[in-house]
Image (tube, grey):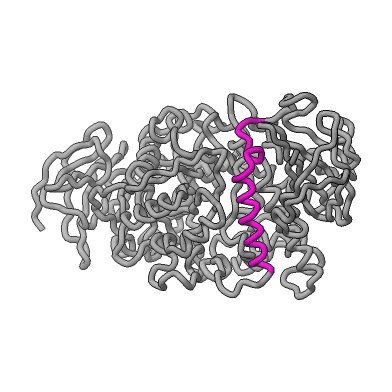
Amino acid sequence: MKLKLEPGSPHQLGATFDGRGVNFALFSANATRVELCLFDAAGETARITLPEYTDEVWHGYVPGLAPGQLYGYRVHGPYEPRAGHRFNPNKLLLDPYARLHVGPLVWDDALFGYQIGAKRADLVMSKSDSAPFLPKCVVVADGEPPSHARPNRPWAETVIYEAHVKGMTASHPAVPEHLRGTFAGLTDPAVIDHLVKLGVTAIELLPVHASVDDRHLVDHGLSNYWGYNSIGYFAPATRFLSPGAGVEEFRAMVDRLHSAGIEVILDVVYNHTAEGNDLGPTLSFRGIDNASYYKLADDPRQYCDTTGCGNTLDIGHPRVLQLVMDSLRYWVTACGVDGFRFDLATALARDNTEFDPSASFLDAVGQDPVLSQVKLIAEPWDLGDNGYQVGAFPPGWAEWNDLWRDGLRSYWKGDMGMLPALGRRISGSAEIYDRRGRKPWASITYVTAHDGFTLTDLVSYNHKHNEANQEGNRDGHSDNRSWNWGVEGPTDDSAILDLRDRLRRAFVASLLFSHGTPMLQMGDELGRTQGGNNNAFCQDNETSWVNWSNLGERDVAFLEFVRGVVSLREQLPLLRSRKFLHGEPVAPLIKSIAWFKPDGEEKQAEHWEDPIAKCIGAAFAGDKQILLLLFNSDAEPIDFIFPYFGKRHLRWRLLCDSARGLIRPDPAPIATGKVTIPGHGLLLFERTD
């Protein structure tokens, strides 16, 4: 193929179609030459050297090319791993700005930049062509962004539902079989109806960027199901696309969810890539400019790795920061996304080696007119030194609060001395987040998430059971703070099942009645189990998929209970306070928040130190209303005397009894001076006079 070539422009990175041709632009500070390779279904059709190099960007314009054109790059430069350079023109490379990939990645030794099996390992450059085994990039025309107005749900009204695109619909009988596991399947009326009835306001999708199934997983018949192994930050994962579809299917999904009032949050992985460590494959960034894209160790042959995945992107580099910012803005402006959850976010805030709340990435997002207006959620830790940074992210950010998860798990398991932790967590974790004008919504509260037990497994297993992952049950957390209540795993014992149901209800009621932003995990409301696997990252099968069929009576009842407590949160503003409560007076002798012992007396400082106490009352007051929450993690019921408010007893209406699974069970006010809190139970009352 003979093609005319023009200089083009360096200013818009990637492949840009302007109606008459395509501009190609690729950043590489250390390359000596860049070749654009064009493909059709039969193979490579042309190889063109990009003619211009401006401000460290290689660029050229090819008239006559159109959307749908397949392409990749070969980048020339020194192959000197000891100096941090791993250029190898024998390797076809994916464009970091490509908006669509096509074709599978087929594992072969040719995908590695060095000669597999050589005595000097990665010091020996491979001469094999990797093009037959690598997906190809696709030129994509700009499309219309979603047309429906964004829900723009305030943080204080947000309830998040963490989900996996495939896991949500792979087994859904109402979704057409050819759409199961796709973006289109996620918008089937039956799925959206479930989310709407559940009452969630945002769906947080596990990674949807183009990603790679690790070679060792494929060799064992497994896959990287979760998708935390990105290789393209603009391209949707093709496994979630219907046959022949592109990014327009993702946009349509966003549009339909928006029309149902549901926001879309993406879980994104900008901390590392799928290229792994120094012995990993050369698929994109490594071959384009290894020394610019990655943080290298003191020995440049090695990588700094604060992610546990073999490498760490150098987001402090201006061009890498540009890549991330451009990617985020693309998903917001072109695709309608409402927010992001950043995997291992501490790694993104290390311009050098230490976490910095004013790191270049955090400052850039904070001043960006687009990104500063969407929901930003940090997973506030990584595996590097001082990686645990819960509470340290700047204003405007929310954070996963694992202290809430651990504290509530320990409390409901019956551990001693947990009342102080319970009090701090249900009132918004003010000791962590109440600074610099941050609000209670900054605490993302959750009992379970993708990384760990499901809710059913949390009350059914004492130990993890990850044998199916083929790592000898060594993977996954061992500190789960779970309890099986008498039998490990499934049982027909109705007494044990009753107790497990009681604990499930206590957990979800605690979650929805606490200050903060609650997050539910996909399928917990339906009793989803992973058979005790608490690290199902590689299980693309029924282990991880939601089972929508043949729900038993217990799970149907639990689903109704979850819907009920979500609805109560929506109806009662005091459960989703927009500010931290510190006991300020809201009326004569009535505080915004107060804590009570079972005898009805207000808790004093010394009472919090009681190591055996497992019962507490919490009152939230404001706007001429008072809510009273009564917690009892003991196995036995406890009598609780209603406290005085303003020197008098009030009349109370029961709104929720988690032990019995009741929501608004009786409209009649309670006139007696005390109530019995069932064992392993939570009661919610509202003032009626």
Quadrant location of the N terminus?
A: bottom left
Left or right relative to 371: residue 506: right
Residue 476 appears in the picture as rendered:
yes
Left or right relative to 364: residue 577: right
**Point 63% across, 44% down: residue:** 445
Q: Position of residue 163 (x, y in %)?
A: 52, 56
Placement of 339 over or under 249, stated as above or below: above
Q: Position of residue 577 (x, y in %)?
A: 63, 35
**Point 90% across, 45% down: residue:** 612
| Secondary structure mostly taken by the magenta-highlighted segment of the chain | helix
- Magenta stretch contains residue 21: no
Quadrant location of the C terminus?
A: top right
Q: Position of residue 490 (x, y in %)?
A: 72, 72
Left or right relative to 203: residue 640: right
Q: Position of residue 249 (x, y in %)?
A: 34, 58
Residue 301 appears in the picture as rendered:
no
The residues colored magenta run 554-580
Q: Quadrant of residue 528?
A: bottom right
Task: Give the camera-side residue of 91 and 625.
Answer: 625
**Point 45% across, 61% down: residue:** 213
Task: Give the camera-side residue of 455 and 328.
Answer: 455
